[in-house]
């Protein structure tokens, strides 16, 4: 079974530039998550989708971050414009929405804003 | 709201030593509890889980028991190996109350020396 796919693995941009990350979840997983993991910290939820609807985006900085999951499958997270404090690993995860099943994580995208 | 408090690190042990990483949780409902492991440069991998009180999760020599009376889910291993060096995250999810959102602790870094 293929895992959660993310791209790119690494990205370096200058502040005020824009960047986009892509995620393809495990086939059949209705729930998709984007997490931000700052060095030395635990993952922080940015947004959670159920199919193509948003379940929770309360911690998404909506003035600069946006995310979509148009067909209920793959998803894109965008940052525009980026700030230095956005430097982090962005993790995508998916889960099968039946009971308290585990979330499966991709390898993440390491973003460096200079 | 729901949260996880995890023992701070870093933790350094000699090979074959006994490992305990403490984790306590706060939840309004009946969450499932997880331990995830993150190797350098990788995403999070599920190590073990427990879905109800008194359940014991186990994998690769690691164990954790879901203790509702002490709201704890401590991770243990009887004899650690160099290959266990990683960051360990305790997490919970509660599909009934928070729509299967995952809450993570801050992580505990483990280094095992030969």
Image (cartoon, coloured by chain):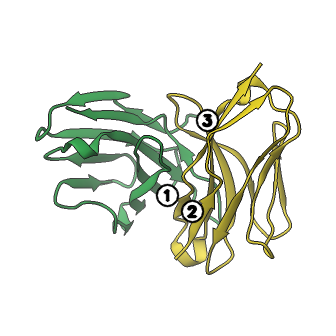
State the mark number for residue A97: 2
N-terminal of the two: label 1 or label 2? 1
Q: Residue at x 85, y 33 (%)?
A: B17
Mark 2 neighbour class, 10 Å CA radius: few under 14, some 14 to 19, many 20 or more: some
B93 left or right of B20?
Answer: left
Farthest-out residue, bottom: B28
**In front of the other: A96 or B108:** B108
Q: Secondary structure at mark 2?
A: loop
Residue A30 numbered mark, or none: 1
Query: Disc 1: which chain?
Result: A
Determine the residue positioned at 68% across, 55% down.
B34
Tell me, what hue is chain B?
yellow
| Snapshot quadrant of residue A48 | bottom left
Chain letter of disc 2 in the image: A
Residues at marks 1 and 2 touching, judged by CB atoms closer than 8 Å: yes
Chain letter for the green part: A
Q: Could you say which disc has been placed on residue A1 in the image?
A: 3
Q: Nearer the viewer, residue A55 or B66?
A: B66
Is B41 above or below relative to B57?
Answer: above
| B60 vs A99: above or below | above
- B77 w.r.t. B72: above or below: above
Between the C-alphas of marks 1 and 3, the distance is 16 Å
């Amino acid at each position: 079974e293929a895992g959660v796919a993310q791209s790119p693995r690494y990205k370096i941009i200058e502040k005020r530039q824009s960047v986009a990350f892509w995620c393809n979840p495990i086939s059949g997983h209705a729930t998709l998550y984007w997490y931000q993991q700052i060095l030395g910290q635990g993952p922080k939820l940015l947004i959670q989708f159920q199919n193509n609807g948003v379940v929770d985006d309360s911690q998404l900085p909506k003035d600069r971050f946006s995310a979509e999951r148009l067909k209920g499958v793959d998803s894109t997270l965008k940052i525009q414009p980026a700030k230095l404090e956005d430097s982090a690993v962005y993790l995508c995860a998916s889960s099968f929405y039946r009971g308290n099943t585990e979330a499966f994580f991709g390898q993440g995208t390491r973003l460096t804003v200079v | 709201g729901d949260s996880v408090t995890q023992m701070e690190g870093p933790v350094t042990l000699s090979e074959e030593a006994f490992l305990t990483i403490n984790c306590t949780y706060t939840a309004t409902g009946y969450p499932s509890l997880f331990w995830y492991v993150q190797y350098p440069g990788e995403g999070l991998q599920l190590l073990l889980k427990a879905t109800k009180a008194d359940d014991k999760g186990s994998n690769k020599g690691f164990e954790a028991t879901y203790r509702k009376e002490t709201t704890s889910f401590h991770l243990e291993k009887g004899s650690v190996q160099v290959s266990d060096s990683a960051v360990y995250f305790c997490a919970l999810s509660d599909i009934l109350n928070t729509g299967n959102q995952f809450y993570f602790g801050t992580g505990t870094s483990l280094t095992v020396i030969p």
